[in-house]
Image (cartoon, helix red, strand yellow):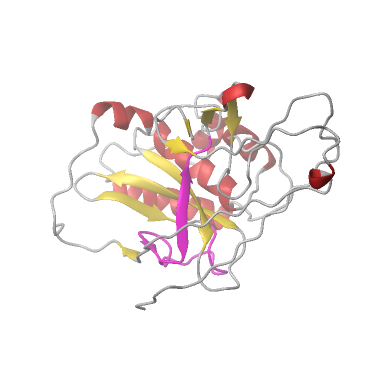
Amino acid sequence: EVLDDSRERRRMLVINHAGDDPLLRKGFTVRTTLTATIFDQRLERGAPEHPVSPLAPPEREKWLEATNTYDYHKPLVQKWMNQHNMWKGRDEKTIDFVHRVYKQLRVHMPYDTKDGGAWVCSQILKVGFGECCRHSIVTTAILRANKIPARTVCALWAIDNKSQGAHCWGEFFLHGVGWVPYDTTLGDDKNSEAHFGTKKGELIAGMVDFDWIIDAGPFGKKHVAGIDAYPAFWSKGERNMDNEKCETHTHVRLVRGDR
């Protein structure tokens, strides 16, 4: 086990073998089993059933921080926000502003899975398109620039035995309510309101945000992204890992479904 900078424990597999070990010449398989209870989420009007505590100052600062990924302080990002009126009005309610950002990205930022360069807000706005991860990065950066605590959540699909791949969405912290989800890429209807303040229990949430620095033991501190869907690995020794190949397969078994 290793500790990342958020003091959370993460598993790290270390394999030490001779360079000519015939048992590992064709690679190896790592299997991880996750057991999770997942729920639908839906934002409703009215007082919360249980009081929600505000974020503690250090935690609030964490979700407002400008980072390498959420580089909202860069001139290109500031210019884009000015052009698209992505600043919260003086009398505009937080939820109304976030909804406006949701609509802007959903309607006007094309969804595309082709390579757009680094998963960094300024780069994404430069190319002008992106898939779910890039959408979530841009919305998170915009909200943080407006002093609204926000984060990106990465997850694995967990619908049935055919579930494959990963997905990302955004969340913002609403005072008195807690973390509220929104998704600017699900569904074919760009004008759909079905993905603001709601999320079906079809995903196992894992990595939050992309600026993780992990203490990888003998390899030192490493920056990783999307580690739940794409395992990070390093090596050192006399040989090399040229033309390495890494495949990830997901199998989901529903233990119980209440829907």
Q: Position of residue 49 (x, y in %)?
A: 14, 59
Q: Position of residue 234 (x, y in %)?
A: 69, 32
Which quarter of the figure has residue 79?
top right
Q: In the rendered image, which quarter contains the C terminus?
A: bottom left
Q: Position of residue 53 (x, y in %)?
A: 17, 42
* Relative horizontal placement of residue 149, taking residue 155 as reference (left or right): left
Q: Main secondary structure of the magenta part?
A: loop
Q: Residue at x 64, y 51 (%)?
A: 30
Number of marks: 0
Segment colored magenta: 185-210
Which quarter of the figure has residue 251?
bottom right
179 and 91: which is toward the camera: 179
Q: Is residue 52 above or below residue 17?
A: below
Q: Is residue 123 above or below residue 33?
A: above
Residue 184: say if magenta.
no
* Relative horizontal placement of residue 235, taking residue 230 as reference (left or right): right
Q: Position of residue 258 (x, y in %)?
A: 34, 78
